[in-house]
Amino acid sequence: MDALGYVWLGILAVFQGPEAFALLGVGVSVTLVMVCAGFLLGIVAGATPGLGGPIAMAISLPILISAFGFTPDALLPVMGFLIGIMKGATIGGAVPAILFNTPGTPDSYMTTLDGYPMAMKGQARRALRIAHLSSASGDTFSDIVLILCAPFLALMVEAYLDLPEKTALLILSLSFIAAVVGGSPGKGLISAGLGLLAVYVGTGEDFYPRLSMGTQTLNRGFPIAAAVLGVLILGTVFHQMAQGHADRLRPSGDAKTPDQDADRALSWPEVRALMPTILRSSVIGTVIGALPGIGSTLAATIGYTSAKARHDRHSPPDATAFGTGAPRGIAATEAANSSVSGANLIPVLSLGIPGNTAAVFLILAAESIGGFNPGPSVFRFTTDQVNPELVIAFGLFTCMFVANLMNWTVGGVFMRSMGFLARVPRHRLLPVVLVLTLTAIYVQETRMEAVWFTLGFGVLGFGMRLVGMSPLPFVIAFILGAKLEDSARQSFSATGGDPWFLFTSPVAAVFMALSVLVVVLGARRRP
Amino acid sequence: MSRTGTRALGLICASFAVLCITVWIPLDTDTGLIEKVRRRVEIGDALAPTVAAVFVLMGGLLLALAPGPTEAEDRAPWRGTLGFGVAMLAMIVAGFAVMLVAGPMALALADTVQGSAREYRLLRADTPWKYIGFVLGGVIAISGPICLAERAVTIRALLIGAGAVAGMIALFDLPFDDLLLPPNGDY
Amino acid sequence: MKDIFKTLLGAAAVALAATTTLAADWTPPGPIKLMIAFRAGGGADTQARLIAEELEKRHGWKIIPEQVTGKGGLNLAAVLKDAPADGTVIGMAVTETFGYNMAAADAGMKPGDFTGITTTAGFQMGVVSLSSKGWTTIGDAVAAAKGGEALRFGAMSPRLADLAYLLGKAQGVTFNIVEVRGGKAVMDGVNAGDLDLGFMAGIQSKGVAAGDLVNLASALSVPLNQTPDAPTFADLGVDFNSDGQFLFAGPAGMSAEAQAAMSAAIAEIISDPDTGAGALIAKAFGGPLIVSGAALQAQLAADFDASGALLAAASE
């Protein structure tokens, strides 16, 4: 089996998997159906202020797992659905941003700056088309980079990194995330440290479940879903509910939009004028997405500001200025935030290190179902027997392209019809989301303790948001914690108990030096 | 956050970390930072949590010693937000607590009336018992926060709660034979 | 030792026959909670779920599987110990949980706190390396170690780590023993070159058949089915072995009818290669291995007692 053989098997796994139904005598695979359904649901979730991709993924995951079971056959449909949501939510988020000045997802905030002014000028439909074009282009670009890079990065890691270097790489990723994400390095370190501490409860090598205070409640540790969904989803829900209460602000979406121009496709010159902006932003988003921990919001901000700077320098003075309805402003933002989604799977698939929330949910799915461990061992191109994990990986790439195809074909139409969702009142929707999340966790864990844990982590996530601390380092540390400890123990044993195992090889030493450097540099810039 | 606020946060986190390193972790792990097994020194179970606590300690000290400038968006009405959060949490906890006990209580009541003696555990997958707790608790946990946000108990809020609970039953219970709705896995 | 088991096995067969009539009448008083001590999605978890499905189909029992993982099955045992003994709460783990792990943890649990229902299958536990290393038997690895190479030996449980240590001791070499999570992790480590050799409990069969991997030794009391020429641990001067099986168990005090009904029902399913569970066991674990009733209880007690000796030997 050569590399192309694996690519082909991955494509077949998507198209010839178990059938959902037959269309004109041709079987349609269940994976295909799930990717498309996920994509449409993602648009809906993205277009509903307060929902967004992560919440939609959190709620769907347990239902999907119950439906598909714990077999390797479940991996592609379930993860395909999540990938669909991830991609759909990015374009969906632009809808309320443009129509009602309310970003559907945080990363579409920058879209409001030029999108809403365009809508006020009667060009809402054109703005939506520009957003869709940019988003779909950025997304496709990023996926291509992912598919080209991930296997090679994984192969390099397997070929050149031994156990101690892998440990050092994990430490580097964690300190990078702590130093760079949100708030300040101080807050990032606290967030990551708490995540590690939480995952170490009840685990460990010894038969006594450490830090369990001798109780049966804690001896199984905190379920990963309780910690991740608690801090991410419940924390957001609490925060949004409380803020909505505190502001008791304008009911979203009441603004009157003026009469709109007729809908027409973008002309070729229009597309050509936007293309340089889209490409530049795609590159920015892809590079940022490939670094763990930096999300699409930052990519959108950088994409927008760099396009604005360029525009201010090079455009004639009579061109529409950024912030007053410039098409390029929308293009720059949407291309940048969408091109994060593919690239941020590079560290997940090649190193097993999740970089953002979407990746966290893919890892959660893989962990829950079993049979697929994202990391360098996935990309072993074995020749005499089939490596099933590699087939899954290429299956996932195929799913991404199916979702992209959906995006280019029906995505735009579907997205433009979702404007009404901005009127769904948050304070009625969010409590339903909250109980649905808790129920979904209970169904998986089947004990009330898991619900109490989730609520506890929700309070923690709420508190973190109140003090301006990003919960992402917590979540990523929670996911990487066990791997970090195992790999440190293994390196230590494998080197025959060398206490300096992290510093004896040059590569590991460089990784360790870099870990210290990112924290120090971050702290100097903004403590 | 203000500088004082950030400093306080840093100090709280740092003290918590010190407490972990000096009290909780040493007392609640069995193998120490390193241990000797099979004539070899190995990493013990206390090392990883200690490293985690050191992370928190470093972060806390960083905040306490160099809190940085007051952040601009410090207009957040902290108190109102916090108070509402606590009230909402209480409502949800109450809902799930009711969920936990409502089914067995209903069964005990039915038993007293009918003079039978049944165990809830054995009926946890049977209609109607399996729904009683989930429906009652679920409606409280959904409608409660809605009413709280609207500052009024409305029929509409109750209807949303009931509808959502019915939807969840349709989602989790009807299609899957071996899934248990809360709280039935606990029995 | 073996003779004792044979006698007990005979006794169990008689006991089984006697209770079969009773067993046929037994039905669980409510839904059965089946706790599984393994990560979702692995071979062991799949085995448990397939058996549960088939039990539901054949007997109309309602079975609700759930994961209770961690601490080598001891987390499951801790919950199972205090569960109602009417046959509505059972667990699936490995014999090692009730033997070595309980003895080593010393957390106040012993096999007598449980009712063994039945074992389902054994492990084809071998010491495996990449064939590209050029080793054909464990002697070659030992020679390499004696030549000064520091060898990394992967093990997926403390008991196996002890066995690896004793193997090195018997052969006069020191391995760098690396404990990893699960047999799949040993295989990944060996494939990636992070480990030089390690224990694999059956997942090596495809690789060995393809010629990528080689069984250097059998960690069992008997030779491996796939590589019968590989020496056993006894041949290599180690007094202990990794014999072990998957088993279903309930809390102590389960009625004989319930125990017999369940073990008969499970045995019937796993012995039938047309069922999903039977096919899986035939493929991955070399066919069913059924010990139940008094024989199983005696085996668990004996394993527990013998573990003390292994623990002592490994900490000498």
Image (spheres, coloured by chain):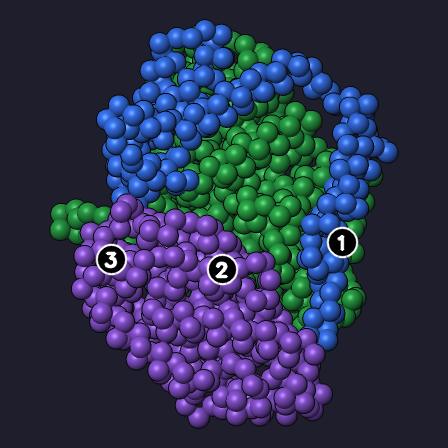
Chain colours: A green, B blue, C purple
Question: Residue sitting at 61 percent across and 53 percent down?
Answer: A209
The three-letter code of the residue at mark 3 reads Leu
**Residue B34, located in which quarter of the rendered image?**
bottom right
Which chain does tag 2 point to? C
Q: CA distance from mark 3 to mark 2?
A: 23 Å
Q: Residues within 10 Å of mark 2 (few under 14, many from 20)?
A: many
Q: As drawn, is A404 to the left or to the right of A237? A: left
Which of disc 2 and disc 3 is earlier in sequence? Answer: 3
> Separation of disc 1 and disc 3 at Cα?
56 Å
In the rendered structure, the residue with mark 3 lies on which chain?
C
Residue A115 in the image: x percent, y percent?
Answer: 50, 21
Q: Which residue is mark 1?
A: A514
Q: Quadrant of the N terminus of chain A?
A: bottom left
Can marks 1 and 3 be said to lie on one chain?
no
Give the number of the disc on residue C73.
2
Q: Secondary structure at mark 3?
A: helix
- Name of the residue lying farthest toward the left: A25
SS assignment at label 1: helix
Residue under the point 54% across and 23% down: B89
Q: Is residue A310 visible?
A: no
Task: State which quadrant residue C133 falls in.
Answer: bottom right
Cβ atoms at labels 3 and 2 below 8 Å apart: no
Residue at 46 percent across and 59 percent down: it is C113
Mark carried by residue C55:
3
The location of residue A92, given as percent across then percent down, is: 43, 30
